[in-house]
Image (tube, rainbow, N blue to C red):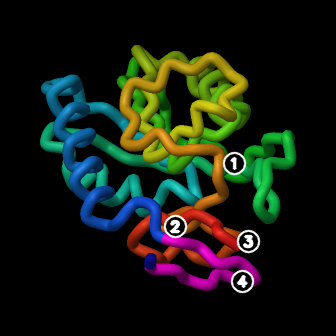
Amino acid sequence: MQTVQVRDKQFAISIPEAKIRERVTEVAAEISRDYEGKKPIFLAVLNGAFVFAADLIRGITTDCEITFTRFSSYEGMGSTGNVEQLMGIKESLKDRHVVIVEDIIDSGLTMKHLLETVKSLGPKDVQIAALLLKPDNLRENLDIKYCCFRIPNDFIVGYGLDYDGEGRNLSSIYTVVG
């Protein structure tokens, strides 16, 4: 079992890079089919979703745009329960097809807040593309059309996800083991 040290914790590989790339390619193809001829705008949530967003957007075969927003609800290894918008949405979303790109949906609190914000801007439709979903921890009723992986309620790092700012650069996803 391959392990890595991030700060004071040990992590074991749980989703290898090849499996991530394969699944992201499949989801990009599905989105491309669904949005053929519609020119969606992808709204990536920083910081965690930047790696997923980059790989996903490279797989999109229809005309599209990408923009970014930033929210915070995590500190250390857990959610604070408070959602704070750190960087707003600059582009007009009115009458646009919006695909929110998120690294992980845990409780769903951040995504619910973001959905409310986006819907208030008058888009034609809004869908969610999530790299990871923790269904056992989900507290909000969300329609997540595009999901790469459903995972247990464990703390993870890698592929853009961090532990206090570290571990984002790992190409695979790792689960805390000690």
Determine the CA span between mark 3 and mark 1: 15 Å
Q: Amino acid at mark 4?
A: Arg
Residue plotted at (36% across, 24% down): 97
Residue plotted at (31% across, 32% down): 40
Secondary structure, mark 4, is loop
Say which residue label 4 marks: 7
Figure quadrant of the C terminus = bottom right
Q: Is residue 166 above or below residue 70?
A: below
The residue stretch that appears in magenta: 2-12
Determine the CA span between mark 1 and mark 4: 23 Å
Percent coordinates x, y for residue 159 in the rendering:
45, 65
Determine the CA span between mark 2 and mark 4: 14 Å
Percent coordinates x, y for residue 69 in the rendering:
58, 48
Say which residue label 2 marks: 174
Please rate how many residues cluster around mark 1, counting C-alpha atoms within 10 Å: few if below 14, some from 14 to 19, many from 20. some
Mark with earlier residue (1, 2): 1
Circles 4 and 3, Cβ within 8 Å, touching? The answer is yes
